[in-house]
Amino acid sequence: MAAKERVTIARIAAEAGVSAPTVSKVINGRPEVAPETRRRVEGLLHKHGYRRRVGQAEEPAGLVDLVFAEIESPWAMELIRGAEAAAHEAEASVVISVLHTHAGPGRDWLERIAARRTDGVVIVASRLSETVRSQLSARALPFVVVDPEGEPAAGVVSVGATNWSGGLAATRHLVELGHRRIGMISGPPDMLCSQARIDGYRAALETAGIASDPTLVRRGTFLVDSGRTHGTALLTMEDPPTAIFAGSDLQAFGVLDAARRLGLRVPEDLSVVGFDDLPLAHSAWPPLTTVRQPLGDMAAHAVRTVLTMRRGENPDARRVELATDLVVRDSTAPPRGEG
């Protein structure tokens, strides 16, 4: 069998009907290329699976791009701290971009990072199309996805947390306190972390011989308003839960507010568990029992991984899940009449 012909800039240029320097400008994110020409060249780069060869003599830029779908959340600050710490260790800097969409990076963003010759890209909670993955690879830009929304494509390096184990530990804690009617509020159904936390919740109930009641499971966003709305709905049921496991600390704060508005005391009348262990969790009232998600460590691991890939080394694993831990504080107690 003949060896596969290596795809070169010259070959792409000939097929596109442009000069080799024009193809090089597209690969490197240079602006002086007509939009139609750029689209044609990018299509051929994608079609042929072009990969830019990075010379060993090429010096690192000392930059890592950290890309968020949105940044208005406490999670973002924890991720930024972790990324900054890992970059500082490597004598690199972090450039932060916000897409304001979960659809993933677009052409303009790709051209900007290619132009500044970043060493690698860490993408937080976004979906990556096959086209964008190919464009990143064609530009020899190593990338890692942190907490991907959906199942990562084959070969994509990702970093997450043990969400299933966290959901199991949170629910098991409530069961061991004596709760039998436990509500669950989680995030969107198409997010991997959301479904994994629900699966852990259900596994804990099944292990304890408690039937899972679908009316006690609610899906929303991971924000305060969602916790308040769904918490109110659960607590005003004819047979309300005595405990609620919220899929994020922000949701848990919303549940605490819903309980106060309904005249319920936490933990005397209702136990609440969150997920994340944000800095605000220990200063909530009462201090929140929660599952610690190592957000900073996740971002730091992702930064170290892209810098490893930048040196031409393969990552130790394509999918890494860092351990979660249950942190017990004052928002959980046995249900009334027990303990």
Image: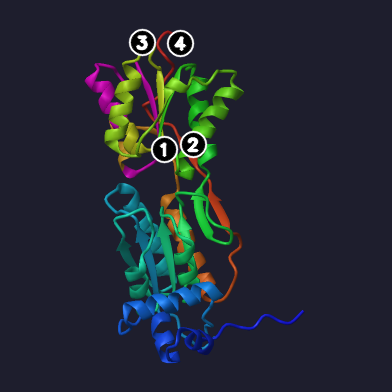
**Quarter of the rendering occupied by the N terminus:** bottom right
Residue at the disc numbered 1: 275
Q: As drawn, is 168 to the left or to the right of 64? A: right
Which callout, 4 or 3, points to the residue nearer the camera? 3
As helix, strand or loop, the secondary structure at mark 1 comes to: strand
State the extent of the magenta-drawn residues as a range.
254-279
Q: Residue furthest left?
A: 261
Structural distance between the alpha carbons of marks 4 and 1: 25 Å
Q: Nearer the viewer, mark 2 or mark 4?
A: 2
Residue 41: quarter of image: bottom left
Instruction: Look at label 1 and name its amino acid.
Output: Phe
Q: Within 10 angstroms of label 2, few (less than 14), some, or many (20 or more) residues?
A: many
Residues under labels 2 and 4: Cα distance? 27 Å
Q: Is residue 61 left or right of residue 208?
A: left
For the residues labelled 1 and 3, the Cα–Cα distance comes to 27 Å
Q: Of marks 4 and 1, which one's residue comes earlier in the chain?
A: 1
Q: Which mark is residue 238?
A: 3
**Which element is circle 3 on?**
loop
Dot 2 or dot 3: first in sequence order is 2
Q: How packed is label 1: few (under 14 Cα within 10 Å), some, or many (20 or more)?
A: many
Residue at image mark 4:
338
Pointers 1 and 2 in contact (C-beta within 8 Å):
yes
Query: Would residue 262 be counted in the magenta stretch?
Result: yes
Return the x and y of residue 194 as percentages of the image width and height: 45, 39
Does label 1 or label 2 sit earlier along the sequence? 2
